[in-house]
Amino acid sequence: MAEYKVFISHSHGQDQYYEGVRSFLKERLGKNFRDKSIDLSHRVQGNWQRIAEAKIDDCDVVVVINKPSATHSEAITKELKYAKKRRKPILAVVPREGDRRSSVVQELADDHCDWDSQHIADAVKTLALNSSSSGGFWSKLIGG
């Protein structure tokens, strides 16, 4: 069974959304889900960017909470641009509170989904299948 390594990009004020996405992925992917996100201790130490880049390098998919506040977060913007540079697929998740979205996230995301555990898990699986860090589509197809 495949392992899904996911980096969840979020700001300080989005911890409840981070926990929600993390919970959805644990519920739907079970033992195959690996959370590669940054925890609060890394943010406090001030070395988040170096750590984020290493964690993004080691993930299959980057998930970002698509709220307007993401547009104003330097950390989220840097994480998403780094993910793009490293050709990591980005999934934007729109929280249930409404459909206002970040212009930065809209521009950089490869796929978008609503706040639904099955939709998020399915999108992660699909994006991970095509992720270069997991061997890519053809490698998985032929069992490599």
Image (cartoon, grey):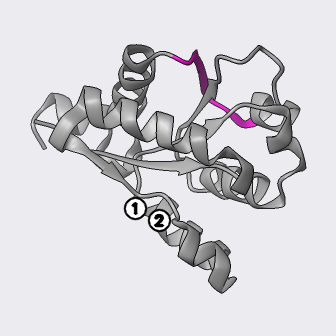
Categorize mark 2 by other alpha carbons within 10 Å: few (<14), some (14-19), many (20+). some
Whole-percent x, y for residue 34 in the image: 30, 51
Residue 58, numbered label: 1
Measure the C-alpha gap from mark 1 to mark 2.
5 Å
Residue 100: percent from the left, percent from the top? 83, 20
Is 5 located above or below residue 28 in the figure? below
Amino acid of disc 1: Asp
Q: Secondary structure at mark 2?
A: helix
Specify the segment rendered in magenta. 108-115
State whether residue 113 appears in this view: yes
Q: Are marks 1 and 2 in contact (CB under 8 Å)?
A: yes
Three-letter amino acid code at the position of disc 2: Lys
> Which part of the image, by quadrant, shows the C terminus?
top left
User: Can see residue 63?
Assistant: no
Image quadrant in which you'd find residue 67: top right
Q: Position of residue 57 (x, y in %)?
A: 47, 63
Residue corresponding to mark 2: 55
Percent across and percent down for residue 134 are: 30, 47
Q: Is residue 72 above or below residue 74?
A: above
